[in-house]
């Protein structure tokens, strides 16, 4: 009989004597489970963190609330939870009776061991409990006379521009500068955001120059007549405010529940607001629900947004406020209206309305509202999760006779096939109408071809010049790739012309313009395409310009390449890649995913002028736009993320090498 695992050692009596035994742990779980009615009778509210490996829900019964957090993966996880409905409650871990920090304004961070879980009892905070003061930035006090407007104030406006805005902007994700000393904003105007009430929100507009470029930005502001709390940091606070005996706080209300409610109400009423010759127009679409709109209950800011402020409202609406003011027709609004109201394309969230500023003959987008689509996350996040499991599997099966093959990729390839079908359907929808003229397909002309070649050649030349000047500052592992690309400098122009003949029997159409895995939502067994704003570094005119469908296809293929490289980088932090087997397996993953996407795209695409029927001609067209995207990525990585430079370098060299082999 086994002395360690036999019945003489493992039995009820022995396990009952050990607090760490499986029996004792199970009894403890059952005891805690029975200690509250919330587990059995409570309502269930799901909290959806961005980390898809973590399941979070709250069971609530009368005044009791139980927060349940479970890690469904075999690796440690961290998640930020939006627990704002339970603000100021204190989580008490129910198995160990350990008190955790109180829930505050910011997302609540939890970390979990592999397959770990927590049960938290959300207790009301004892009001007599002493709360340690937090370290908060210095805040100015603005004196606002009754009836004054932001622009009419002289001294207060100067304090606001000089002492308030720089620090706030430097702390804001959407503003490009992080040093307050380098920020010198100038308030130019302000427009009321509603037509009723004394304490209404205002849209303030300011301009600032960074690195020689002047841009305008939007600040939605409102005074909350509650005394400014200097002990507790509110990331939305600009400054304290005084108006006679009244004291309050000036807030950025872009993601505030009341501000969002006013925006949705104004949109329902098709309201137009005017101030000093400026008009704020609220333009709903036919898809905005007709039923009476209730004030929103749950409003959550999307923290991953970088350049705008996006808010999820009651799992019904997605409200995006554009922080940077750009004059012209916004492509996201224009494309959304066409796909929603003209083409009837079902696999993008319906556009419900937009807010635009009219200054004389100029128009600028302020905000856009889409219908919320319940989803399992964006395709980049889903791809990363699949790849991490694939990497674990490959390491466990390193001695397999068929390295690189994996059951993990089978369901993922179905998503890629579905993506190919939906992208082809989107392109057919965008090419399917001659009205309005902005969406009418146009034949590809020789001038288009010449412009595309010159644009790629010009960007490549800028990249080559940077390489020559900064080669010594780039890490050794990337220098041999740079040398390989520089060796193709003289022949690049001819290669581009070989890929893109002057006469192409095809069509230019409106297209997504910034298509990658992050712009795809996984919705059950289907996919939805989002965010038609276009590449933010391009002008509005460039983003609205028509181009071949191959540009979107190239964007997604490059994104698949990035996802595989990112997975390899994560894997190498854990253990080295022996004999390059893992890298080779990820290359196989990338190629199979690309093939699944392309096969479904070609099968669904029924218009030979959008995608050439001749396989060789289609490959040349695709390779040209893959090169265009790769050089764009190289330029971006050089400026912002030099550690990622290897990905687009490898992609550009691979395409140029394939083309050279074909030519020879």
Image (spheres, rainbow, N blue to C red):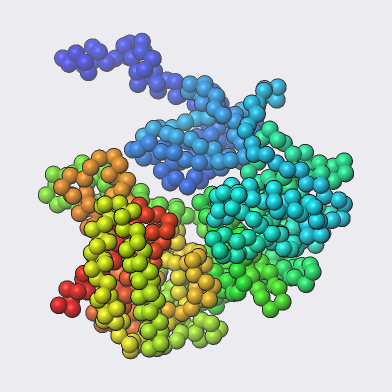
Q: Which residue is drawn at the image coordinates 26% and 57% (left, top)?
A: 479
Left or right: 461 as drawn, with respect to 354: left
Q: Which of the 4 image quadrants contains residue 140? A: top right
Q: Position of residue 39 (x, y in %)?
A: 53, 32
Residue 378 appearing in the image: yes
The answer to whether residue 270 is above or below residue 316 is below
Q: Which residue is drawn at the image coordinates 17% and 44% (left, top)?
A: 578
Q: Of 329 and 607, which appears nearest the observer?
A: 329
The answer to whether residue 62 is above or below residue 602 is above
Q: Which of the 4 image quadrants contains residue 237? A: top right
Residue 261 appearing in the image: no
- Name the quarter where the C terminus is drawn: bottom left
- Name the quarter where the N terminus is drawn: top left
Left or right: 388 as drawn, with respect to 362: left
As drawn, which residue projects farthest toward the left? 401
The answer to whether residue 232 is above or below residue 319 is above
The answer to whether residue 231 is above or below residue 278 is above
Q: Position of residue 245 (x, y in %)?
A: 87, 41
Q: Of 197 and 574, which appears nearest the observer?
A: 574
Q: Position of residue 86 (x, y in %)?
A: 62, 37
Q: Which residue is drawn at the image coordinates 50% and 73% (left, top)?
A: 543
Q: Position of residue 580 (x, y in %)?
A: 18, 50
Left or right: 46 as drawn, with respect to 379: right
Count of residue discs: 0
Q: Of 606 and 155, which appears nearest the observer?
A: 155
Left or right: 541 as drawn, with respect to 498: right
């Amino acid at each position: 009989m086994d002395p360690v695992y036999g019945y003489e050692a493992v039995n009820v009596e022995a396990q009952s004597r050990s607090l760490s035994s499986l029996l004792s742990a199970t009894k403890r779980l059952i005891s805690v489970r029975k200690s509250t009615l919330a587990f059995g009778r409570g309502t269930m509210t799901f909290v959806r963190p961005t980390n898809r490996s973590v399941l979070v829900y709250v069971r609530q019964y009368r005044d009791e609330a139980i927060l349940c957090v479970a890690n469904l993966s075999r690796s440690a996880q961290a998640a930020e939870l939006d627990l704002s409905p339970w603000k100021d409650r204190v989580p008490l871990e129910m198995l160990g009776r350990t008190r955790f920090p109180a829930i505050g304004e910011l997302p609540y961070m939890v970390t979990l061991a592999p397959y770990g879980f927590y049960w938290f009892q959300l207790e009301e905070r004892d009001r007599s409990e002493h709360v340690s003061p937090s370290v908060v930035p210095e805040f100015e006090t603005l004196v606002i006379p009754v009836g004054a407007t932001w622009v009419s104030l002289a001294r207060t406006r100067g304090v606001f521009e000089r002492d308030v805005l720089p620090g706030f902007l430097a702390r804001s994700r959407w503003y490009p500068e992080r040093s307050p000393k380098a920020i010198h904003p100038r308030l130019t105007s302000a427009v009321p955001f509603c037509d009723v009430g004394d304490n209404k929100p205002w849209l303030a507009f300011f301009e600032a120059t960074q690195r020689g470029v002047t841009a305008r930005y939007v600040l939605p502001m409102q005074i909350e007549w509650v005394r400014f709390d200097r002990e507790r940091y509110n990331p939305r606070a600009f400054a304290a405010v005084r108006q006679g005996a009244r004291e309050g706080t000036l807030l950025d209300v872009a993601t505030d529940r009341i501000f969002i409610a006013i925006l949705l109400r104004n949109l329902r009423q098709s309201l137009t607001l005017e101030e000093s010759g400026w008009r704020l127009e609220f333009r709903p679409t036919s898809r905005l629900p007709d039923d009476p709109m209730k004030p929103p209950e749950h409003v959550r800011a999307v923290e991953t947004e970088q350049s705008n402020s996006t808010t999820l409202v009651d799992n019904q609406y997605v409200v995006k406020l554009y922080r940077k003011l750009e004059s012209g027709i916004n492509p996201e609004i224009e494309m959304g209206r066409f796909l929603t109201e003209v083409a009837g394309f079902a696999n993008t969230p319906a556009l419900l309305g937009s807010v635009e500023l009219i200054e004389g003959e100029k128009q600028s987008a302020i905000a856009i509202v889409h219908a919320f689509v319940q989803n399992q996350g964006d395709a980049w996040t889903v791809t990363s999760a699949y790849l991490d499991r694939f990497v674990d599997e490959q390491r466990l099966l390193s001695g397999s006779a068929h390295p690189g093959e994996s059951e993990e990729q089978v369901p993922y390839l179905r998503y890629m096939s579905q993506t190919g079908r939906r992208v082809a359907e989107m392109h057919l929808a965008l090419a399917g109408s001659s009205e309005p003229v902005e969406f009418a397909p146009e034949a590809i002309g020789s001038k288009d071809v010449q412009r595309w070649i010159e644009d790629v050649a010009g960007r490549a030349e800028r990249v080559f010049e940077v390489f020559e000047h900064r080669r010594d500052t780039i890490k050794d592992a990337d220098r041999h790739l740079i040398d390989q690309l520089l060796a193709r400098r003289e022949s690049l122009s001819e290669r581009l012309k070989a890929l893109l003949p002057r006469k192409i029997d095809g069509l230019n159409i409106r297209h997504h313009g910034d298509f990658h895995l992050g712009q795809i939502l996984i919705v059950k067994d289907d996919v939805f395409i989002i965010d038609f704003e276009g590449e933010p570094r391009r002008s509005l005119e460039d983003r609205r310009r028509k181009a071949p469908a191959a540009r979107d296809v190239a964007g997604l293929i490059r994104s698949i390449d990035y996802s595989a490289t990112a997975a390899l980088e994560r894997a190498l932090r854990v253990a080295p890649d022996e004999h390059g087997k893992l890298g080779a397996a990820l290359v196989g993953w990338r190629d199979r995913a690309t093939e699944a996407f392309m096969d479904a795209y070609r099968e669904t695409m029924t218009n030979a002028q959008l995608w050439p029927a001749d396989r060789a001609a289609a490959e040349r067209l695709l390779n040209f736009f893959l090169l265009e995207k790769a050089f764009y990525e190289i330029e971006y990585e050089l400026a912002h993320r030099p550690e990622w430079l290897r990905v687009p370098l490898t992609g550009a060299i691979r395409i140029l090498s394939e083309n050279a082999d074909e030519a020879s």
